[in-house]
Image (tube, coloured by chain):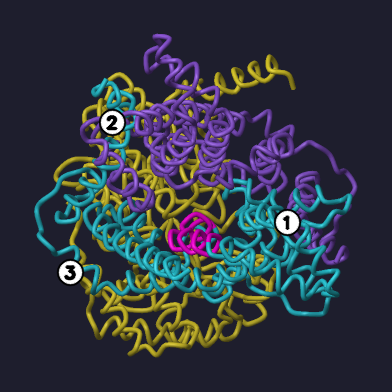
Amino acid sequence: MDRRTFLLAGAALATAACSGPSGLGYWNLFSGGDGSRMMDMVGAIDTRLDAVTLAWGTPYYTKLAMAAAGGRAPDLAILHLSRLPGFAPLGLLDPFDNDLLAAHGLTPDRFPPAVWNRARHDGRTYAVPLDTHPLVLFYNTELCARAGLLENGRLKPIRGPEQLLAAFDKAGLALAAARDVNPWRLFWTLYRQQNGQGLLDDAKALTALRLLAKIGATTRFTDNNAAVALFGSGQAGFFWNGEWELPTFQTQHTPFDVAPFPQVYDRPAVHADSHSFVLPHQRSRDPQRTAETVAAVAELIGQSLTWARGGHIPAYQPVATSQEYLKLAPQADYRSAAAEVELDPPEWFAGAASDLQSAAGATIGAVLGGTTSPDGALDELKATLVRLQNTPRPA
Amino acid sequence: MKRSGFWFVAPFLVLYVAFLVVPMAIGLGASVTDEGITGHAAFVGAANYGELFQDPVVWSSLWHTLIFTVTSTPVIVLVGLVMALLADRAVPERWLYRLAFFAPYLLPVSVVVLIWNWLYQPGFGLINDLLTRLGLGEVGWLSTDGMAMTSIVITTVWWTAGFGFLLYLAALQEIPHQLYEASALDGATPFQQLRRITLPLLSRTHQLVIVLQILASLKVFDQVYLLSGQGGIPGVRSIVQYIYESGFTRFRVGYASAISYVFFALIAVIALVHFRLTAARGSKR
Amino acid sequence: MRVVAAVLAVIWLAPLAWALDTALKPESETTRIPVSWFVSGMSLDAFGRVFADGQVLAWLGNSLLVGVAVTVLTVAVTSLAAYGLSRTRFRGRSLVLALLVAGIMVPPQVLIVPLFAEIVGLGLADTYWALVLPQVVLPAMVYVLKRFFDGVPRELEEAAVIDGAGRLRVYWSLMLPLARPALAAVAIFTFVTTWNNFLWPFVAVSDPHLMTFPVGLTTVQSSYGVRYAQVLAAALLGGLPLVALFLAFQRQLVTAIKG
């Protein structure tokens, strides 16, 4: 390569580097099926979005916070609603203008109250929920039929710990327990079903942990990939995880159906979270761009049906109650879960991919794996919570 | 004339003060506050320092960093030396060795991690496939804490052995040929030559490579962070990684600054001890 | 010995060969078990898709821009400073020398958190400035060049000064040309270090359009699921320029890294 070509190549690269975004900047953490459905939605709306996908979980939230702290954040981003208590009070998000939201039909009465309340901080609205995504119970229709657990082709209602254990024992359970946040979600579900308050009611936590120890004894200790493979290939009758795994089993043609998370204790409750739209903090916010951003949010929410095909329950009620959604099977079968959702406790250290989920997940995972006793795990869990609660909250 | 000298230094000094001295000062200031990622701060005295000495994660991260350093350094030095001895011979394919041994060192860490992540995959990963073919069981390279550390060390050896290789190669080429010729006349075998001539004459290079390697290993972040994936692997977290996480994942700039300072003090002590040791040895000669 | 060397070279090249092999496979073949080196339908498609997507090229462009900017600035300011320290006496000179030695001791890793806070305070977060300026501070380079200038005989310079040349003139038209090998070493070392640097660029920018290659490659994901052939093609595409440069400038590089 002579010097001239080299310089030309350099110039070409530099131009490529400097050509910045043209549409509104939009960050999300969706890959796989969710990712391509989101790209479909972005392609279907009028507003031009310059969508970027960052690695799910901690890396995403770290980058989002750093971008917001730096003042040049993207116009729009996805946030798990459970992370709002860690973001909004620090000034990492800008609030929505309620009038602007209302102008696009995004009013509180059109969202489930349990979710909308968590979108607010200090009397202002910081998030517009796109969905709720609860844990559900996947079951293999062939295996469960053979085990006599079906009635008219559907899973017979499971009530109470004994029935749950018996069902898992008969048809087999696949469960993500190793190195995962899933154990925390299971625990929180069982804890809230007993109406356990705060962090943490010892007796109720212990009840939940003891049941998890028994559940763990009915299943192999695996990570999520292995659990998905076990259920997908028909080696387990049940799979207990989020509805977002639905498309995986549909493409694998697993004979399966989905039921809401069974009510084991006093009240129906299920761990869930909500993907929501937020405005990351910008140092100099342009009202014109903000108005366009809100319009884009409304347009994307209008595409909720596309989103629902991936298993998520639309948060926007006009879609959630529409005929098209109600005809969507099996998605519409567990839509009742939306009324029973329990997000993580509203603490700054909690939420999706948070310290709480991973630290507690490791302890509770060990209970499922049979390497820690429920009593030992309770002590560990309380120590974790004391540590997190004593950690000075950043200013 | 007296003033003009300063103006030569001024441009560098401005950048040096702005991006080294000032951040050092900012860090010291932040370490006694509860500063968060958005900059608001209140004075908390020595609370951060008190907290960090009680923080089990600080100690475990230091421990992992130490484990990484003491396991990777000897291997990297030894492999680099062996490579240099092999490639220093006058054979036609010498250029190939140089390329093979040194190329990985020129790759950005992200490329290295992507390639090794791919090699470590269960099932379709090249290494596990090889193990299966040999009738051995698959290994979960990144799924347990102990294996993850081993995998990180293996990757690091592959990536950075080329650095020691190059330093050794340069040192080998400065050893006069006459020494070997003379000893060959005395009937020394190649192995004896290696022991009596080559290795002793490389002693300064050993020292250099080992010290540089130790200092680099103590500051490890990139490959540990990237190979650990989304949730991280608590059993391999390095101290620099904990600084990063405290500051940017938990938004505690003040606390992260305090850990940075303690870590800096530790590095400075190690460097000073090394300096004293070499100075003492030098004066004996 | 030759066999040992060959085996070691093969082991060392195998990961790269396997990455290249995967990048040439059709996407559907990449995760097939048992593993096979040769499958039908091997092609350069994955590389083509990387080019068509443009994102990787933009990151490489950023890396080039930042690498060149840092290198040019570093060579300029460190050689000026080294010359000043080597050939002139001014008040505070010993303080500057002490600062330099102290600066060599500071690992950049301990600065990331306060440096980020500073960059945010200056309003430079998510700009090219944030990528370039903090990476220019390499006190060790001043030290290396100062020792080089110290070795240049003073007589050469005095002759020029008698001819009426000012200090800057002497620096520019006498010392710099003399120092070409040392400057080349500093330049190559700086460029390689900057091109491969991960931690600071990872902290300094969050905007994917400004990311350098090593940062973008690991931070940004494809929304269409994992495509192994394409990811490895991108990795190789970004990793190879320096290896090619090594082949071209082997000798200078060896000097640079020794320095």
Is residue A41 positioned above or below A330 on the image?
Answer: above
In the image, taking residue C82 as reference, residue A291 lies left or right, namely left
Is residue C6 positioned above or below A116 on the image?
Answer: below
The chain coloured cyan is B
Q: Disc 3 on helix, strand or loop?
A: helix
Q: Which one is in front, B132 or C192? A: C192
Q: Earlier in the sequence, mark 3 or mark 1?
A: 3
In the image, taking residue A56 as reference, residue C93 lies left or right, namely left
Is residue A380 positioned above or below C65 on the image?
Answer: below
Residue B43 percent location from the top left of the image: 9, 54
Residue A356 percent location from the top left of the image: 33, 66
Query: In this orientation, does residue A146 appear?
Result: yes
The answer to whether marks 3 and 2 mark residues whose Cβ atoms lie closer than 8 Å is no
Q: Tell me the amino acid under the disc marked 3.
A: Gly
Q: Residue at x 27, y 27 (%)?
A: B6
Could you say which quadrant of the image residue C204 lies in? top left
Q: CA distance from mark 2 to mark 1?
A: 41 Å
Q: Which one is in front, C144 or C204? A: C144
The chain coloured yellow is A
Residue that numbered label 3 is attached to: B50
Residue that numbered label 1 is attached to: B176
Q: Chain of mark 2?
A: C
Which-is-in-front pick, marks 3 and 2?
2
Q: Residue at x 26, y 58 (%)?
A: B261
Q: Disc 1 on helix, strand or loop?
A: loop
- Residue B220 sits inside the magenta stretch: yes
The residue segment tinted magenta is B208-226
Q: Tell me the amino acid under the disc marked 2.
A: Arg
Question: Which quarter of the image is occupied by the N terminus of chain A?
Answer: top right
Labelled disc at residue C89: 2
Q: Chain of mark 1?
A: B
